[in-house]
Image: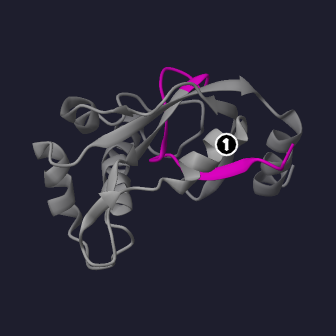
Amino acid sequence: GLEHVATVTCADFICEADLDNAYFVRPSMAYGGKGTLAPCKNKLMKTIIDNGRTNIVTLQSRTLYYAGTYTITCDPMPMSIEELMMLPTEVCTLFPTNLSLVIEQLRVLLQAQRCLATATSGGQKTADVSAILSDYQSGLLTALRYQARRVDFDQTLDHALRSIWTGR
């Protein structure tokens, strides 16, 4: 039902070849109020793991899409620098887009890396996103990959979101 719903961006939630297998990318460390690095709490991921099964709604091009009901399949794994720089290898094309696929792939790639850097900044408005990305590229910072698997699809929720956005 609707008791466990998480709204994420397509930069946080990355589809692999299809919607059945996806993953979340989150920082392992984040800057605190005094500008020092500390372990990132990743509250959204903790909530998703604690729920066991969570309906994932993604925000893409200012529209909400229901992806399905997901469960995290294993403990978070550190991402290599190569994996991080390849975020994502493919954009899930099951969601309609007005942009060409190449532009959409580049946009989501840059958005995923920027989203990770922003999450690492701990909400500091003056954070240097480029410097944080450099820290990831050099291996100073590490991203975590939370593997997820779709275990269900709530037709009622999907229909409700579609009717809100399309009027049908």
Asked whether residue 92 is in view, the answer is no
Q: Nearer the viewer, residue 52 or 26?
A: 52
Q: Nearer the viewer, residue 154 or 102?
A: 154
Q: Which residues are magenta?
A: 1-21
Q: Position of residue 9 (x, y in %)?
A: 53, 51
Q: Residue at x 57, y 25 (%)?
A: 73
Count the marks: 1
Q: Nearer the viewer, residue 118 or 48?
A: 48
Q: Position of residue 80 (x, y in %)?
A: 23, 31
Residue 120 relative to residue 12: left or right:
left
Q: Residue at x 79, y 47 (%)?
A: 162
Q: Is residue 10 magenta?
A: yes
> Which residue position is annotated with label 1?
50
Q: Residue at x 59, y 30 (%)?
A: 94
Q: Position of residue 161 (x, y in %)?
A: 79, 49
Q: Is residue 127 magenta?
A: no
| SS at badge 1 | helix
Question: Which corner quadrant of the image does residue 72 belong to?
Answer: top right
